[in-house]
Image (cartoon, rainbow, N blue to C red):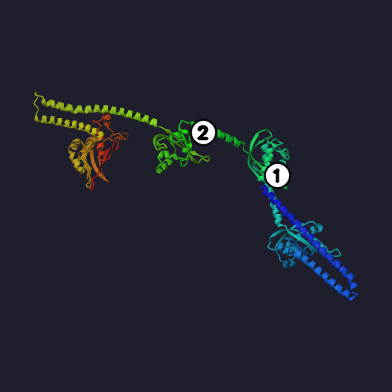
Amino acid sequence: MAEKINKTREELLNELEKLRQRVAELEKSNIAEREETSKAFRASRRKQRTSTAELRKSEPGRKQLQATLRVSEDKLEESEEKFRSLITNLKLGISRSTPEPGGVYLKVNPAMSEITGYSREELLKMKVADLYYHHEERKAALGKIMADPHQPVETTLKKKDGTVRMVSIKGAPVRDSWGRIRYFDAIIEDITERKQAEDALKQSEERFRKAFHSSPVAMRLIGLESGRMVDVNEYFLKLVGYSREEVIGHTTRELDILREKEEAHLERVRILKETGRITDLEIKVYTRAGEERICLMSSELLLLDGKEYSLSALKDITELKKSEEALRRSEEKLRLVFESAGIDIAVTNLSGAITEANSRMVETLGFKSRTELAGKNIYEFITQRSHTGALKMRQTLEKGIKGMEYMLYHADGTKFPGEFTASILKDAAGSPAGFIVTVRDITERKQAEDKARELRVLREVDHLRSELMANVSHELRTPLASIKGFTTTLLRSDVKWSEEEQRDYLQTINRETDRLTRLISDLLDMSRIDAGALKLELGTCHLQQIIDAASGRLTTLTQRHQLNIALPLDLPKVHADELRIGQVLTNLTENATKFSPEGSEILISAEPAGDQVIVSVTDHGQGIASELMGKLFDRFYQAQRIADGHKGGTGLGLTICKGIVEAHGGRIWVESKLGEGSKFSFTLPAARGD
């Protein structure tokens, strides 16, 4: 900026000097021409007067006189033509005007038209004072010219279009032989552009001065060769701790501000001369108190009044350097923690691309080096390159993950169980910039958990088996004891039983025998289901046929309840094993009777559902707690309830129902509310074509 101002100022001054020299040359030329012409004319007139008398005495003399007069007239005309040409082509305005305050132009050259905007004819008809805003200004200008004809007078003229032009007028009065002023001759120069340039230069220099002294960094102006300080701003003085008087005229080396060798200064001078600038050179500056400050110095080469100067700006970066060093140490500590942490850590951008990872993460994911892992997307190791999975994972990451378990992938595609944690990493503005991800390989932990789980299951199974055996033993002894007791009673020879008593005893024996048969059948069915050997006799039938086939058993089970059947007329046939589905209905109905009050309704219903039929058994019993519904279809579950004093059973009924339904390709479930009852439902495939 300063260099540009300097160049502009020099150019304007040079141009102004050229203009002034040109005006002087033109003035000298004009005066010389006029004096030469006047001298020639006067000499010619004297010669003519001297020789005229002699030449008139003879005829040859008259002819010679006439020839001489013609030559003189030609020379005079030539001289006047040169003068007119000079006046016409001169770029400066030249005028002759009458001496009164208002003034009238007598003669003007073409340049006057360019300066004023009026034509020659218009100028010769108007008053000179009309070119001024106020007539008094014309009078004042004449007064100054009269006082010092050699000193140009600067004033303003009003052009024809109303614009104002700054002009310089240099004039002189022309007097007659009695000393009276006959008219004024004037040379007028339009200096508007020059004045504007000078004003602009002054403003620019003022702005530069203000910028120099108000700059928020230390500034100094030094002579390039001497290195002596010409000017400094307040920030420089504040930086070094000296007063202005103490630094002006001295070098920084003399004041021990820059503790450098002469060669360093000369090298900077060489670079400035070659390149014109030095940018961000880090130097050490020493204050008056001896404190070391680190600064960035930038310098520009300036040319002022033909001399070379260096304008330098020094930015104190001492605190920044300290902060950078503290940050470097902090990052080093963080890097040490990052690397020595007992878990796998990686840093990613918002897209999931890994930017940093510690050696444990590299090893866990199966890579050979950090370079090989860098740029890989963390989602690839969680979702196996699934776009949908990656999108869901990113949405999850943005919410934050803490201790979530996922199946992760090694670089070779093999899986391993891992504990995954992710936190949002924010930038200085507080905006999300990426994620910090930690991974822990929990394979060994999972294996230990699996073994512990298997052990718990084995213990639970062993416990349930013990409960089952106790329950089965109880269930077996009860019918056997009844059979044995009534058989022994009938075989007594000392008692004669009536036919009615005998029939009653035999019915009890028959009923207990059926009970024993069902118990054995349940155990055998469970064994077949476990072995996958359950055989189905599939066929197409109506659900009503299955209910009719099991009606005897259903009627017996619901003697103390109200059994209702609700089947829609358009219910499609099912593809099922009639006997096994009858067994499912019987087991569900028996289960309903156990946990429903006497006299309550038990409803068997069905409804079509696409290519399936949903069959339901609904009771109005005590209902089932929600935390127990997930265990109802587990084997041996009922065995636990026997120990709590609940109604008997092996606990295999619902498990057998589940096995039979699933063997048909269906599913079974329960809906229940405490105090309102339960609804057991299962699906069967609808027969094709129905």
Q: Secondary structure at mark 1?
A: strand
Measure the alpha-carbon separation of dots 2 and 1. Answer: 49 Å
- At 9% from the left and 24% from the top, the residue drawn is 493
Image spot of residue 88 (x, y percent): 74, 65
Amino acid at the residue labelled 2: Arg
Q: Is residue 648 above or below residue 100?
A: above
Q: Is residue 459 left or right of residue 540?
A: right
Image spot of residue 167 (x, y percent): 73, 58
Q: Of 457 and 604, which appears nearest the observer?
A: 457
Q: Which residue is tagged 2? A: 335
Contact between labelled residues 1 and 2, with CB atoms less than 8 Å apart = no
Q: Of 347 and 244, which appears nearest the observer?
A: 347
Image spot of residue 266 (x, y percent): 69, 40
Q: Secondary structure at mark 2?
A: helix
Q: Which residue is tagged 1? A: 309
Label 2 CA crowd tier, 10 Å (few <14, some 14–19, many 20+): few
Q: Is residue 475 left or right of residue 338?
A: left
Mark 2 or mark 1, which has the lower sequence index?
1
Q: Quadrant of residue 185?
A: bottom right
Q: Of 437 and 590, which appears nearest the observer?
A: 437
- At 23% from the left and 40% from the top, the residue drawn is 603
Q: Can you see residue 356?
A: no
Q: Is residue 52 above or below residue 157?
A: below
Q: Quadrant of residue 682?
A: top left
Q: Can you see residue 410?
A: yes
Amino acid at the residue labelled 1: Tyr
- Give the label on residue 128, or none: none
